[in-house]
Image (cartoon, rainbow, N blue to C red):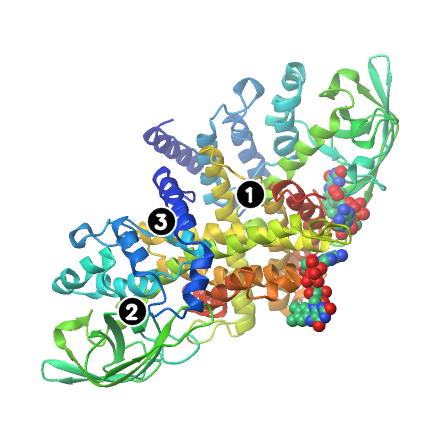
Amino acid sequence: MSTANLEEFRQEIRTWIDENLPSELRVGTRKDLPKKLLSQWNKALISRGLVAPEWDTEYGGGGLDRKQAGVVKEELNAVRAPKLRTFGVAMLGPTLLEFGTEEQKREFLPQIARNEVTWCQGYSEPGAGSDLASLQTRAVREGDEYIVTGQKIWTTGADKADWIFCLVRTDPDAPKHEGISFLLFPMKQEGVKVSPLNLIDGSADFSQVFFDGARAKASHLVGPLNGGWTIAKRLLQHERTQDGGSEGGITGAMKDTIFDLVKREVGLDASGTLQDPTIRERLAQQELEQLGLRLTMRRAGEEMRASQTGRDIASLGKYRWANMVKDEQDIAMMAMGAQGLGWSGDGFGADQLERTRAWLTTRADSIWGGTNEVQLNVIAKRVLKIPE
Amino acid sequence: MGLILTEDQLILRDMAKSFFDEKSPVERMRALRDSRDAVGFSRDLWKEMGELGWIGILFPESVGGADMGYGELGVVLGECGRVLAPEPFMSTVLLGGNAILLGGNEPLQKELLPDVCSGNRILSLAFQERGRFAPYAIETKAKRDGDHYTITGRKSFVLDGHVADQIVVAARTAGSSGEREGLSLFVVEADAPGLTIHRDDLVDGRNGAHLVLENVAVDGARVLGTVDAGADVLDAVFNRATVGLCAEMVGSFEEAFERTLEYLKTREQFGVKIGTFQALRHRIANLFAEMEFTRSIVRDAQTAIDEGRNDIAEATSAAKARCSEVAPLIAGEAVQMHGGIGMTDEEEIGLFFKRLKAAELSLGDAIFHRNRFAHLRGY
Ligand SMILES: Cc1cc2nc3c(=O)[nH]c(=O)nc-3n(C[C@H](O)[C@H](O)[C@H](O)COP(=O)(O)OP(=O)(O)OC[C@H]3O[C@@H](n4cnc5c(N)ncnc54)[C@H](O)[C@@H]3O)c2cc1C
Ligand SMILES: Cc1cc2nc3c(=O)[nH]c(=O)nc-3n(C[C@H](O)[C@H](O)[C@H](O)COP(=O)(O)OP(=O)(O)OC[C@H]3O[C@@H](n4cnc5c(N)ncnc54)[C@H](O)[C@@H]3O)c2cc1C
């Protein structure tokens, strides 16, 4: 698409956003958004094909090219529009597009793009975290079905999910990476039990999942039998990129930016300078880190489009993003002092309580989707190519 | 301009890379240092760079320049950084040349800049009077006397000052040290009566003279910018020189990084390559992330200047804050991961370590620029 046409397209998207996105929602992807407005906005996104702008229209996508999709993303980010980013859209969709059969794409992608079906990710097990490939959950073929037995853990959203994309062992005798398959099956069935876990931030978003004779259609196995590991890794790349690539991290979802919060909590002197020089420097470092991440992700995109020798920066982005969002909350806690130690009660502002919870929630960011240590292992091995 | 090199810039980079590889390996810099060369760099090589159009990249065509930008200059400076070439881009182009370009009237520009572009004139900027960078901490005084000024004071860290033909001197025409108001800039001839120039050798093998000025007379026509408002020019010069310095730093620490990475893949201890030890793998992976982020931020600062954005000062401080934080980290780890050999003068990694320290502290360290950035960002 020519630059002029792209600008025209940008105007079109801007107008569309203006007409469809109420001001109450222009605050980022928050948990406490007005439900009715949010569902209207999500409907608007769905009918304009903007949940999955780059997918073909026959799969429920927007049929846009990469540049147009980039414009959509920029414009939505610019007004802090809440995102409809689900396991289905961000991870399973792109993976099915690459590895799924035509039938699988037609069956699952349109539902995802219309946000009709909720997915969860069945990777981790009690004995298989970082060493994911040692997973033990078994799937055995029986007629045109697989019968699944075993246990998953830390499965985000399992209690609400309709379907699961699950890593299962289909050949227990093969070397550990070569006996794994990628299987899709419904959660709402006998043979699947979900038991939620409470997290340190007071939420219970993730669960233990027990499979005892759960059933999956054989036609819902993605890619080759025992060839699931490659697919699993590709999906992890999508998982790592989505947040490393998200501009501003969790800041985008808070009412106040970290800068507003620190100014308010610490106070400015007459010359407009933060009272505390150490916090000021920490804040500057935080902002520089946000800038570095944003520019580096943009640069990676440009490298890819210009097909210059781009480096794989999914791991790098995930690793630095995780540290950055954690550090942001550490700064907030330092700035709030005792006011950051509240759990409930009207002695604390809603924004303060929210920050405290965010400080707890973000501890997970250097754990899920591959821990920081695992990301560093990947960078050393795959990007810097240092033999092990 | 995007965050990646354009086609033309890629061609320029390849040219510069083969030029420096062939004519200026790190041993050349070492030889200049060890022989305590009278100039401290190669005038011949400098003139070759003039012929290639590299010295004049920033300057308008009317004075013999190429009228290009920091994106292009950054490419050349990055390659200088990779081989630690000591040629006087900093003194003559980024500081002195920029002062004339941004503050000089047309006759001054026509008089001085053509020889700068061809490599036949060396300039410098004398601003610093104490150790830590503090741009307005200037006590040197300039008194008006009819149609000229007389300057008295002391200056230090005047890069390549011992071979400069003209030195731009920042002096106080009003106010007191630390104030932004009351500064003025003067083009002083190196052989002006009352000026003595003492060559000082620096830790990175380069030169930074100190000057004593005793009633040095300068014609009023040789003032840059406006009297008492010299800081307007000075600030603009510092921003641009800092962005240039950052480009050189990126070249130097990328080279130090790559050499260290290579060392991890070849050095054996305990019967294996030391690169197999996770304690080193994780650290070098993190350095890689630091390096990539910093490269993006520096490129953005170049773009800010080249596109005349209104956040040049912010982008500059962002770049230097990151460079000055990352340079000692990478250089320090590079020496550490080389073990005992990293401590030797013979191994080149130490030369990178020293040059990067000089660059880190020049024109403001990380603390200075983080604070300046915070100030510009309103906190
Ligand atoms: C909020 C949250 C949501 C999650 N959602 C999901 C989900 O939806 N679906 C799902 O399948 N999983 C999910 N997970 C699980 C997550 O993927 C795992 O927790 C993660 O992979 C780490 O595994 P582990 O917890 O078993 O830790 P372990 O692997 O036991 O790690 C313990 C520590 O050892 C370190 N370590 C391990 N191996 C190495 C190594 N080779 N080198 C250096 N250090 C190492 C780790 O970095 C870590 O610090 C979620 C986790 C969290 C926190
Ligand atoms: C100033 C100076 C004076 C000295 N004086 C003496 C002296 O008087 N007598 C004498 O005998 N020696 C002396 N030494 C030598 C000194 O003991 C060695 O330099 C040191 O033991 C490191 O060995 P190396 O230089 O071979 O580095 P290497 O062992 O090759 O190490 C290179 C890098 O790899 C790292 N590394 C190596 N193994 C591991 C591992 N298993 N896990 C993680 N990282 C690892 C190291 O920490 C280092 O960063 C001196 C050294 C110096 C610098």
Residues flagged by tags 2 and 1 on a common chain: no
**Crowding near the residue tagged with mark 3, few <14, some 14–19, many ≥20 C-alpha atoms within 10 Å:** many
Q: Is residue B249 visible?
A: no
Residue A46 higher or lower than B269, as above or below: above
Mark 2 / mark 3, whichever is N-terminal? 3
The disc label shown at residue B124, or none: 2
Provide the secondary structure element on which disc 1 rests.
Answer: loop
Q: Quadrant of the C terminus of chain A?
A: top right
Residue flagged by tag 1: what amino acid is it? Gly
* Residue that lies at the very extreme toward the top in this rendered image: A143
The disc label shown at residue B71, or none: 3
Q: In front here: A101 or A36? A: A101
Residue B242 higher or lower than B191, as above or below: above
Residue B338, position as x, y percentages in the image: 63, 59
Subunit ID for the residue under disc 2: B
- Asked if residue A296 lies left or right of residue A188, the reply is left
Residue B237 higher or lower than A362, as above or below: below
Kindly report which numbered mark, 2 or 1, lies closer to the viewer in this rendering: 2
Residue A320, position as x, y percentages in the image: 60, 51
* Residue that lies at the very extreme toward the left in this rendered image: B146
Label 1, label 3: how far apart the Cα atoms are: 25 Å
Provide the secondary structure element on which disc 3 rests.
Answer: helix
Subunit ID for the residue under disc 1: A
Residue flagged by tag 2: what amino acid is it? Ser
Kindly report which numbered mark, 2 or 3, lies closer to the viewer in this rendering: 2
Query: Would you name the residue on which mark 1 appears?
Result: A245
**Residue at 63 percent of width and 49 percent of height:** A319
Subunit ID for the residue under disc 3: B
Provide the secondary structure element on which disc 2 rests.
Answer: strand
Residues flagged by tags 2 and 3 on a common chain: yes
